[in-house]
Amino acid sequence: MQTKANSGSIIRRAYQVDEAAVAYGLSRSTLYKLIAAGTLRSAKVGSRRLIPVDAMEALIAGGGR
């Protein structure tokens, strides 16, 4: 999910699981385990699982959920 900024660039608001895995150097299975444990917030939209960027940043910062 992306939002267009005033400058014309696109600001990412959420990642698909595969994208988050690449962006943060984690495996897909690790992300799914974190989601199942309630440590990482995500949303199901249709058949896609989306992880908000702020949820990933909180996880990396040690804030988890």
Image (cartoon, grey):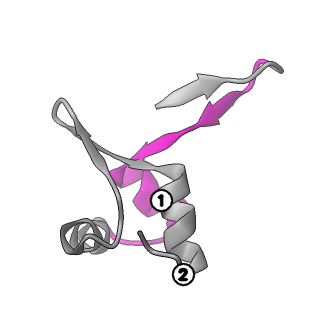
Q: Tell me if residue 15 comes above or below residue 41 in the rendering.
A: above
Q: Which amino acid does label 2 sit on?
A: Gly
Lower sequence index among marks 1 and 2: 1
Q: Which amino acid does label 1 sit on?
A: Ala
The verdict on residue 10 being magenta is yes
Residue drawn 77% across and 18% down?
Answer: 8
- Whole-percent x, y for residue 55 in the image: 47, 59
Disc 1 from disc 2: Cα separation = 11 Å
Q: Tell me if residue 36 comes above or below residue 42 in the rendering.
A: below
**Left or right: where 50 falls relative to 25:** left
Return the residue at label 2.
62
- Whole-percent x, y for residue 40 in the image: 35, 66
- Whole-percent x, y for residue 48 in the image: 23, 38
- Whole-percent x, y for residue 5 in the image: 73, 23
How crowded pointer 1 is (Cα within 10 Å; few <14, some 14-19, many 20+) is rated as some
Circle 2 SS class: loop
Front in this rendered view, residue 61 or 9 = 61
**Left or right: where 20 falls relative to 48:** right
Circle 1 SS class: helix
Q: Tell me if residue 6 comes above or below residue 44 in the rendering.
A: above
Residue drawn 45% across and 74% down?
Answer: 64
Quarter holding residue 12: top right
Residue drawn 16% across and 34% down?
Answer: 47
Front in this rendered view, residue 37 or 23 = 37
**In the rendered structure, which segment of residues is drawn in magenta?**
8-27
**Left or right: where 32 falls relative to 14:** left
Q: Say which mark, if any, is on residue 55.
A: 1
Q: Do the residues labelled 1 and 2 touch (CB within 8 Å)?
A: no
